[in-house]
């Protein structure tokens, strides 16, 4: 039976969990994830976990934060004056925001702190700084 290797196009079902067991994402209620390995579209630990799996095989992997979304980076926190926000916005901690970059692309931010005159936004990936557990089931190698 063939095993997954770099460059393969695979279909995989997964359930991602945090250290406390909370599920943050799962493909079980939708089509399996289809991805070509070796193209950098997956976090490194997820891709590494798929290597050498056989179709229909199931396994659980723990991905350290260094092979997931990395450490939280302090330079991705910044202060934004409340006067720069829309007048009708009432910022709340953990509220999601979208910022438009000078080149027109968008980036996701999270309100980390609300102060009297400003808010602190966090540009880190929401899962940065966390080890992740994934339950994997290789559906097929295409």
Image (tube, rainbow, N blue to C red):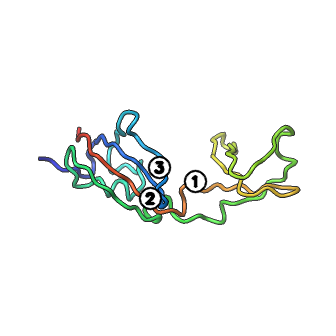
Q: Position of residue 109 (x, y in %)?
A: 66, 49
Against 18, residue 101 (above or below) is: above
N-term mark: 2 or 1: 1
Residue 10 located left or right of residue 46: left
Residue 130 located left or right of residue 5: right
Q: Position of residue 66 (x, y in %)?
A: 46, 66
Q: Given this view, does label 3 or label 1 mark the residue nearer the observer?
A: 3
Residue 126, labelled with which disc? 1
Residue 132, labelled with which disc? 2
The residue located at (47%, 64%) in the rendering is 65
Q: Position of residue 16 (x, y in %)?
A: 43, 51
Separation of marks 2 and 1 at Cα, in angstroms: 12 Å
Element carrying mark 1: loop
- Tag 2–tag 3 contact (CB < 8 Å): no
Q: Residues within 10 Å of mark 2 (few under 14, many from 20)?
A: many
Element carrying mark 3: strand
Tell me which corner region of the image, top left, top right, bottom left or bottom right, holds residue 62.
Answer: bottom left
Separation of marks 2 and 3 at Cα, in angstroms: 10 Å
Q: Position of residue 136 (x, y in %)?
A: 32, 49
N-term mark: 2 or 3: 3
Number of numbered labels in the structure image: 3
Q: Which residue is mark 3?
A: 23
Q: As rendered, which of 66 and 133 lies closer to the eye?
A: 133
The residue located at (71%, 57%) in the rendering is 112
Q: Residues within 10 Å of mark 3 (few under 14, many from 20)?
A: few
Element carrying mark 2: strand
Quadrant of the image containing the C terminus: top left
Against 73, residue 6 (above or below) is: above
Residue at the outermost left position = 1
Q: As rendered, which of 123 and 53 lies closer to the eye?
A: 53
């Amino acid at each position: 039976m063939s095993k997954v290797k770099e460059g393969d196009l695979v279909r995989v079902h997964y359930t991602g969990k945090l250290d406390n067991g909370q599920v943050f994402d799962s493909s079980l209620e939708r089509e399996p994830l289809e991805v070509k390995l070796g193209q950098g579209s997956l976090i490194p630990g997820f891709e590494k976990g798929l290597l050498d799996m056989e179709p229909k095989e199931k396994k659980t992997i723990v991905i350290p934060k260094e092979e997931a979304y990395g450490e939280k980076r302090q330079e991705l926190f910044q202060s934004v004056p409340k006067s720069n926000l829309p007048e009708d916005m009432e910022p709340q901690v953990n509220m999601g925001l979208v910022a438009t970059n000078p080149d027109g692309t968008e980036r996701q931010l999270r309100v980390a702190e609300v102060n009297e005159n400003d808010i602190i936004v966090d540009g880190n990936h929401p899962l940065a700084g966390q080890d992740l557990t994934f339950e994997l089931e290789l559906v097929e190698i295409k």
